[in-house]
Amino acid sequence: MGETPNSGPETPDATTHFGDRMVAEADKAGLVEGVFSSVASRYDVMNDVMSLGIHRVWKDAMMDWLAPRNGQRLLDVAGGTGDIAFRFLRRAPAAEAVVCDMTAAMLEEGQRRAEAAQLADRLTWVVGDAMALPFEDRSFDIYTISFGIRNVTRIEAALAEAFRVLKPGGRLMVLEFSQLPNDGLQRLYDLYSFNVIPRMGKAIAGDRDSYQYLVESIRRFPDQDRFADMIRAAGFEQVKYRNLSMGIAALHSGWKL
Amino acid sequence: MSDEAAAPPPIDRRMLEALVCPMTHAPLTYDAEAQELICKAAHLAYPIRGGIPIMLEAEARKLD
Protein backbone atom coordinates (compact mmCIF):
# COMPACT_ATOMS: atom_id res chain seq x y z
CA MET A 1 0.00 0.00 0.00
CA GLY A 2 1.10 3.57 -0.50
CA GLU A 3 4.02 2.31 -2.48
CA THR A 4 4.08 1.97 -6.24
CA PRO A 5 3.76 -1.70 -7.14
CA ASN A 6 7.10 -2.93 -8.34
CA SER A 7 5.89 -4.57 -11.50
CA GLY A 8 7.22 -4.32 -15.03
CA PRO A 9 7.44 -0.60 -15.78
CA GLU A 10 9.42 0.12 -12.59
CA THR A 11 12.09 -2.44 -13.52
CA PRO A 12 13.39 -1.30 -16.89
CA ASP A 13 15.69 -4.30 -17.34
CA ALA A 14 12.79 -6.69 -17.08
CA THR A 15 10.42 -4.71 -19.26
CA THR A 16 12.51 -4.90 -22.37
CA HIS A 17 12.97 -8.62 -21.94
CA PHE A 18 9.32 -9.45 -21.43
CA GLY A 19 7.56 -6.70 -23.34
CA ASP A 20 3.94 -7.56 -24.03
CA ARG A 21 4.15 -10.63 -21.85
CA MET A 22 3.82 -8.33 -18.85
CA VAL A 23 0.61 -9.02 -17.00
CA ALA A 24 -1.66 -6.12 -16.06
CA GLU A 25 -1.62 -5.39 -12.35
CA ALA A 26 -5.38 -5.71 -12.03
CA ASP A 27 -5.44 -9.18 -13.58
CA LYS A 28 -2.86 -10.73 -11.31
CA ALA A 29 -4.94 -11.81 -8.37
CA GLY A 30 -7.27 -13.69 -10.66
CA LEU A 31 -4.36 -15.34 -12.38
CA VAL A 32 -2.90 -16.87 -9.24
CA GLU A 33 -5.08 -19.92 -9.39
CA GLY A 34 -4.21 -20.33 -13.05
CA VAL A 35 -0.54 -20.14 -12.18
CA PHE A 36 -0.77 -22.94 -9.68
CA SER A 37 -3.14 -25.10 -11.68
CA SER A 38 -0.84 -24.88 -14.64
CA VAL A 39 2.32 -25.74 -12.74
CA ALA A 40 0.95 -28.17 -10.13
CA SER A 41 2.63 -31.35 -11.24
CA ARG A 42 5.99 -29.69 -11.87
CA TYR A 43 5.72 -27.29 -8.98
CA ASP A 44 8.25 -28.94 -6.68
CA VAL A 45 10.72 -29.43 -9.51
CA MET A 46 10.35 -25.79 -10.39
CA ASN A 47 10.91 -24.75 -6.78
CA ASP A 48 14.12 -26.72 -6.87
CA VAL A 49 15.26 -24.90 -9.95
CA MET A 50 14.17 -21.47 -8.79
CA SER A 51 15.94 -21.73 -5.48
CA LEU A 52 18.73 -24.04 -6.68
CA GLY A 53 17.40 -26.69 -4.31
CA ILE A 54 17.69 -24.40 -1.33
CA HIS A 55 13.95 -24.31 -0.60
CA ARG A 56 14.40 -27.75 0.98
CA VAL A 57 17.00 -26.37 3.36
CA TRP A 58 14.68 -23.47 4.18
CA LYS A 59 11.76 -25.80 4.89
CA ASP A 60 13.96 -27.86 7.17
CA ALA A 61 15.02 -24.65 8.92
CA MET A 62 11.34 -23.89 9.37
CA MET A 63 10.82 -27.27 11.04
CA ASP A 64 13.87 -26.76 13.26
CA TRP A 65 12.43 -23.52 14.59
CA LEU A 66 8.91 -24.92 14.81
CA ALA A 67 10.02 -28.09 16.65
CA PRO A 68 6.87 -30.16 15.96
CA ARG A 69 5.53 -32.11 18.94
CA ASN A 70 3.23 -35.08 19.24
CA GLY A 71 -0.39 -34.19 19.81
CA GLN A 72 -0.17 -30.94 17.89
CA ARG A 73 -2.62 -30.11 15.13
CA LEU A 74 -1.14 -28.23 12.20
CA LEU A 75 -2.94 -26.18 9.60
CA ASP A 76 -0.76 -25.64 6.56
CA VAL A 77 -2.34 -23.02 4.34
CA ALA A 78 -1.38 -22.75 0.68
CA GLY A 79 0.04 -26.16 1.52
CA GLY A 80 -0.11 -27.23 -2.10
CA THR A 81 1.55 -30.53 -2.60
CA GLY A 82 2.06 -31.26 1.09
CA ASP A 83 5.73 -30.46 1.49
CA ILE A 84 5.40 -28.77 4.87
CA ALA A 85 2.78 -31.14 6.25
CA PHE A 86 4.89 -34.20 5.36
CA ARG A 87 7.91 -32.73 7.12
CA PHE A 88 5.87 -31.81 10.16
CA LEU A 89 4.28 -35.26 10.47
CA ARG A 90 7.57 -37.09 10.00
CA ARG A 91 9.06 -35.15 12.89
CA ALA A 92 6.07 -35.72 15.16
CA PRO A 93 4.72 -39.24 14.62
CA ALA A 94 1.61 -38.57 16.70
CA ALA A 95 0.67 -35.17 15.30
CA GLU A 96 -2.03 -34.33 12.74
CA ALA A 97 -2.08 -31.98 9.79
CA VAL A 98 -4.65 -30.32 7.58
CA VAL A 99 -3.44 -29.06 4.21
CA CYS A 100 -5.57 -26.22 2.82
CA ASP A 101 -5.05 -24.73 -0.63
CA MET A 102 -7.07 -22.68 -3.13
CA THR A 103 -6.16 -25.03 -5.94
CA ALA A 104 -7.61 -28.55 -6.01
CA ALA A 105 -5.00 -29.62 -8.57
CA MET A 106 -2.20 -28.95 -6.08
CA LEU A 107 -3.91 -31.03 -3.36
CA GLU A 108 -4.58 -33.88 -5.77
CA GLU A 109 -0.91 -33.87 -6.67
CA GLY A 110 -0.04 -33.97 -2.97
CA GLN A 111 -2.38 -36.90 -2.37
CA ARG A 112 -0.61 -38.87 -5.05
CA ARG A 113 2.76 -38.62 -3.28
CA ALA A 114 4.04 -41.72 -1.55
CA GLU A 115 4.38 -39.87 1.74
CA ALA A 116 0.70 -38.96 1.55
CA ALA A 117 -0.24 -42.64 1.60
CA GLN A 118 2.04 -43.44 4.53
CA LEU A 119 0.73 -40.47 6.49
CA ALA A 120 -2.85 -40.67 5.26
CA ASP A 121 -4.44 -41.40 8.64
CA ARG A 122 -2.99 -38.17 10.06
CA LEU A 123 -3.51 -35.95 7.01
CA THR A 124 -6.52 -34.19 5.54
CA TRP A 125 -6.85 -32.10 2.42
CA VAL A 126 -9.27 -29.21 2.04
CA VAL A 127 -9.74 -26.61 -0.67
CA GLY A 128 -10.15 -23.25 1.02
CA ASP A 129 -9.27 -19.58 0.90
CA ALA A 130 -6.67 -18.18 3.31
CA MET A 131 -8.89 -15.10 3.72
CA ALA A 132 -11.99 -17.15 4.65
CA LEU A 133 -10.88 -20.38 6.27
CA PRO A 134 -13.45 -23.15 6.72
CA PHE A 135 -12.32 -23.98 10.26
CA GLU A 136 -13.61 -23.21 13.72
CA ASP A 137 -12.07 -20.59 15.97
CA ARG A 138 -9.23 -21.82 18.19
CA SER A 139 -8.88 -25.20 16.49
CA PHE A 140 -5.15 -25.47 15.62
CA ASP A 141 -1.87 -25.41 17.55
CA ILE A 142 0.24 -24.34 14.59
CA TYR A 143 -0.53 -22.36 11.45
CA THR A 144 2.06 -22.43 8.68
CA ILE A 145 2.10 -20.83 5.27
CA SER A 146 5.09 -21.41 3.07
CA PHE A 147 5.63 -19.40 -0.11
CA GLY A 148 1.92 -18.70 -0.13
CA ILE A 149 1.14 -15.48 1.68
CA ARG A 150 2.46 -13.20 -1.02
CA ASN A 151 -0.15 -14.65 -3.38
CA VAL A 152 -3.01 -13.74 -1.07
CA THR A 153 -4.92 -10.68 -2.25
CA ARG A 154 -5.28 -9.16 1.23
CA ILE A 155 -2.46 -10.30 3.49
CA GLU A 156 -4.07 -8.63 6.52
CA ALA A 157 -7.19 -10.74 6.06
CA ALA A 158 -5.15 -13.94 5.90
CA LEU A 159 -3.27 -13.03 9.08
CA ALA A 160 -6.55 -12.26 10.84
CA GLU A 161 -7.85 -15.69 9.84
CA ALA A 162 -4.65 -17.32 11.08
CA PHE A 163 -5.15 -15.61 14.43
CA ARG A 164 -8.79 -16.71 14.57
CA VAL A 165 -8.20 -20.42 13.95
CA LEU A 166 -5.21 -20.72 16.30
CA LYS A 167 -5.74 -21.81 19.88
CA PRO A 168 -4.47 -19.50 22.63
CA GLY A 169 -0.80 -20.44 22.90
CA GLY A 170 -0.79 -21.33 19.21
CA ARG A 171 1.92 -20.30 16.84
CA LEU A 172 2.09 -18.78 13.38
CA MET A 173 5.07 -19.43 11.16
CA VAL A 174 5.50 -17.95 7.70
CA LEU A 175 8.16 -18.88 5.17
CA GLU A 176 8.34 -16.43 2.31
CA PHE A 177 10.75 -14.87 -0.11
CA SER A 178 12.01 -11.62 1.32
CA GLN A 179 14.45 -8.80 0.66
CA LEU A 180 18.21 -8.81 0.80
CA PRO A 181 19.63 -6.31 3.27
CA ASN A 182 22.15 -4.85 0.83
CA ASP A 183 21.34 -2.95 -2.38
CA GLY A 184 24.14 -4.49 -4.40
CA LEU A 185 23.10 -8.01 -3.54
CA GLN A 186 19.46 -7.19 -4.15
CA ARG A 187 20.35 -5.89 -7.61
CA LEU A 188 22.22 -9.04 -8.46
CA TYR A 189 19.36 -11.17 -7.20
CA ASP A 190 16.88 -9.12 -9.23
CA LEU A 191 18.94 -9.68 -12.35
CA TYR A 192 18.89 -13.40 -11.70
CA SER A 193 15.24 -13.59 -10.84
CA PHE A 194 13.87 -11.37 -13.58
CA ASN A 195 16.10 -12.73 -16.30
CA VAL A 196 16.69 -16.35 -15.44
CA ILE A 197 13.64 -17.65 -13.61
CA PRO A 198 10.96 -16.90 -16.25
CA ARG A 199 13.16 -18.54 -18.88
CA MET A 200 13.59 -21.59 -16.70
CA GLY A 201 9.85 -21.58 -16.19
CA LYS A 202 9.40 -21.72 -19.92
CA ALA A 203 12.01 -24.42 -20.36
CA ILE A 204 10.88 -26.66 -17.52
CA ALA A 205 7.19 -26.03 -17.07
CA GLY A 206 6.51 -24.59 -20.55
CA ASP A 207 5.03 -21.61 -18.78
CA ARG A 208 6.96 -18.36 -18.79
CA ASP A 209 4.13 -16.07 -17.69
CA SER A 210 3.46 -17.95 -14.47
CA TYR A 211 7.06 -17.69 -13.38
CA GLN A 212 7.22 -14.07 -14.47
CA TYR A 213 4.33 -13.48 -12.10
CA LEU A 214 6.13 -15.35 -9.30
CA VAL A 215 9.21 -13.18 -9.66
CA GLU A 216 7.23 -9.94 -9.61
CA SER A 217 5.23 -11.00 -6.60
CA ILE A 218 8.43 -11.78 -4.71
CA ARG A 219 9.80 -8.31 -5.39
CA ARG A 220 6.61 -6.62 -4.26
CA PHE A 221 6.21 -8.46 -0.97
CA PRO A 222 6.91 -6.31 2.14
CA ASP A 223 10.39 -6.56 3.62
CA GLN A 224 11.16 -8.38 6.88
CA ASP A 225 10.36 -5.53 9.27
CA ARG A 226 7.23 -4.36 7.47
CA PHE A 227 5.89 -7.89 7.37
CA ALA A 228 6.69 -8.38 11.08
CA ASP A 229 4.64 -5.23 11.78
CA MET A 230 1.72 -6.66 9.82
CA ILE A 231 1.87 -9.84 11.91
CA ARG A 232 1.86 -7.76 15.12
CA ALA A 233 -1.08 -5.73 13.80
CA ALA A 234 -3.05 -8.99 13.45
CA GLY A 235 -2.66 -9.56 17.20
CA PHE A 236 0.37 -11.84 17.35
CA GLU A 237 3.00 -11.38 20.04
CA GLN A 238 6.68 -12.23 20.38
CA VAL A 239 7.01 -11.67 16.64
CA LYS A 240 10.49 -12.49 15.39
CA TYR A 241 12.10 -13.32 12.09
CA ARG A 242 15.15 -15.14 10.83
CA ASN A 243 16.76 -14.51 7.46
CA LEU A 244 17.49 -17.51 5.28
CA SER A 245 20.25 -17.33 2.68
CA MET A 246 20.96 -13.72 3.64
CA GLY A 247 17.34 -12.67 3.24
CA ILE A 248 16.41 -14.25 -0.08
CA ALA A 249 13.78 -15.85 2.14
CA ALA A 250 12.72 -15.19 5.72
CA LEU A 251 10.93 -17.09 8.46
CA HIS A 252 8.52 -15.08 10.61
CA SER A 253 7.19 -16.46 13.88
CA GLY A 254 4.43 -15.10 16.09
CA TRP A 255 2.39 -16.39 19.02
CA LYS A 256 -1.27 -16.04 19.87
CA LEU A 257 -1.00 -15.52 23.60
CA MET B 1 -28.54 -50.31 10.64
CA SER B 2 -27.47 -50.84 7.05
CA ASP B 3 -23.98 -51.15 5.58
CA GLU B 4 -21.84 -48.10 5.04
CA ALA B 5 -22.42 -46.52 1.65
CA ALA B 6 -19.94 -48.01 -0.79
CA ALA B 7 -19.95 -45.57 -3.70
CA PRO B 8 -18.09 -42.33 -2.96
CA PRO B 9 -14.51 -42.28 -1.66
CA PRO B 10 -14.42 -42.43 2.11
CA ILE B 11 -14.59 -39.12 3.93
CA ASP B 12 -13.01 -38.70 7.30
CA ARG B 13 -15.90 -38.03 9.68
CA ARG B 14 -13.70 -36.22 12.15
CA MET B 15 -12.49 -33.90 9.44
CA LEU B 16 -16.03 -33.14 8.33
CA GLU B 17 -16.96 -32.27 11.87
CA ALA B 18 -14.01 -29.88 12.08
CA LEU B 19 -15.12 -27.94 9.01
CA VAL B 20 -17.38 -24.90 9.18
CA CYS B 21 -18.85 -22.63 6.54
CA PRO B 22 -16.17 -20.11 5.57
CA MET B 23 -18.84 -17.41 5.25
CA THR B 24 -20.86 -17.88 8.45
CA HIS B 25 -18.64 -20.19 10.55
CA ALA B 26 -21.77 -22.27 11.11
CA PRO B 27 -21.54 -26.07 11.32
CA LEU B 28 -22.25 -28.03 8.14
CA THR B 29 -24.51 -30.93 7.30
CA TYR B 30 -23.00 -33.76 5.27
CA ASP B 31 -25.08 -35.07 2.40
CA ALA B 32 -23.34 -38.35 1.56
CA GLU B 33 -25.46 -39.02 -1.50
CA ALA B 34 -24.94 -35.64 -3.15
CA GLN B 35 -21.38 -35.41 -1.78
CA GLU B 36 -22.07 -31.95 -0.48
CA LEU B 37 -21.56 -30.04 2.73
CA ILE B 38 -24.52 -27.83 3.41
CA CYS B 39 -24.63 -24.57 5.30
CA LYS B 40 -28.26 -23.77 6.07
CA ALA B 41 -27.41 -20.29 7.34
CA ALA B 42 -25.64 -19.27 4.13
CA HIS B 43 -27.92 -21.34 1.84
CA LEU B 44 -24.84 -22.86 0.25
CA ALA B 45 -23.85 -26.42 -0.63
CA TYR B 46 -20.11 -26.99 -0.89
CA PRO B 47 -19.12 -29.85 -3.19
CA ILE B 48 -16.80 -32.72 -2.24
CA ARG B 49 -14.78 -33.82 -5.24
CA GLY B 50 -12.59 -36.91 -5.14
CA GLY B 51 -12.82 -36.86 -1.36
CA ILE B 52 -11.66 -33.24 -1.10
CA PRO B 53 -14.14 -30.69 0.26
CA ILE B 54 -14.18 -27.54 -1.87
CA MET B 55 -14.83 -24.85 0.73
CA LEU B 56 -14.99 -21.85 -1.58
CA GLU B 57 -18.05 -19.64 -1.85
CA ALA B 58 -17.46 -19.31 -5.59
CA GLU B 59 -17.67 -23.08 -6.02
CA ALA B 60 -20.70 -23.61 -3.80
CA ARG B 61 -24.18 -24.31 -5.10
CA LYS B 62 -26.79 -21.80 -3.99
CA LEU B 63 -29.80 -23.27 -2.23
CA ASP B 64 -33.26 -21.73 -2.51
Image: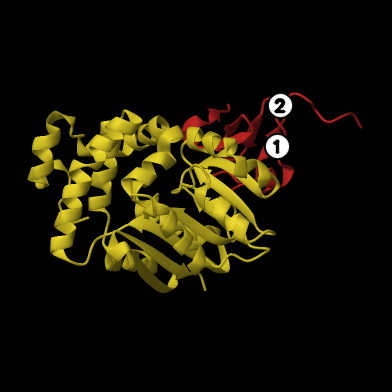
Residue A144 at x, y = what percent? 49, 57
| Residue positioned 73% across, 42% down in the render | B13
Image height of B12 relative to A72, above or below: above
Please state the chain letter of the residue tagged with numbered disc 1 in the rendered image. B
The amino acid sitting under disc 2 is Pro
- The reply to whether residue B6 is in sight is yes
Q: Residues within 10 Å of mark 2 (few under 14, many from 20)?
A: some
Could you tell me which residue is drawn at 38 percent across and 46 percent down? A48
- Residue tagged 2: B8
Amino acid at the residue labelled 1: Ile
- How far across and how far down the image is residue A17, in percent? 12, 36
Chain letter matching colour yellow: A
In the rendered structure, the answer to whether residue A39 lies left or right of residue B51 reads: left
Closer to us: B59 or B4 = B4
Residue at mark 2 shares a chain with residue at mark 1: yes
| Residue A161 visible (yes or no) | no
Helix, strand or loop at label 1? It is loop
Query: Do labels 2 and 1 touch, CB within 8 Å?
Result: yes
Report in which chain the residue with disc 2 lies.
Answer: B
Q: Colour of chain B?
A: red
Which residue reaches farthest front? Answer: A52
Res B11 label:
1
Instruction: Looking at this view, name the residue that lies furthest to the right.
Output: B1
Identify the mark at residue A116; answer none if there is no mark: none
Residue A64 rendering spot, x and y as whole percentages: 50, 67
Location of the N terminus of chain A by quadrant is: bottom left
Q: From the viewer's side, name the closer residue of A52 and A128.
A: A52
* Mark 1 residue crowding within 10 angstroms, few (<14) / some (14–19) / many (20+): some
Asked if A131 appears above or below A174 in the picture, the reply is: above
Secondary-structure class at tag 2: loop
Percent coordinates x, y for residue A155 in the rendering:
36, 54
Tell me where residue A120 sits by quadrant.
Answer: top right
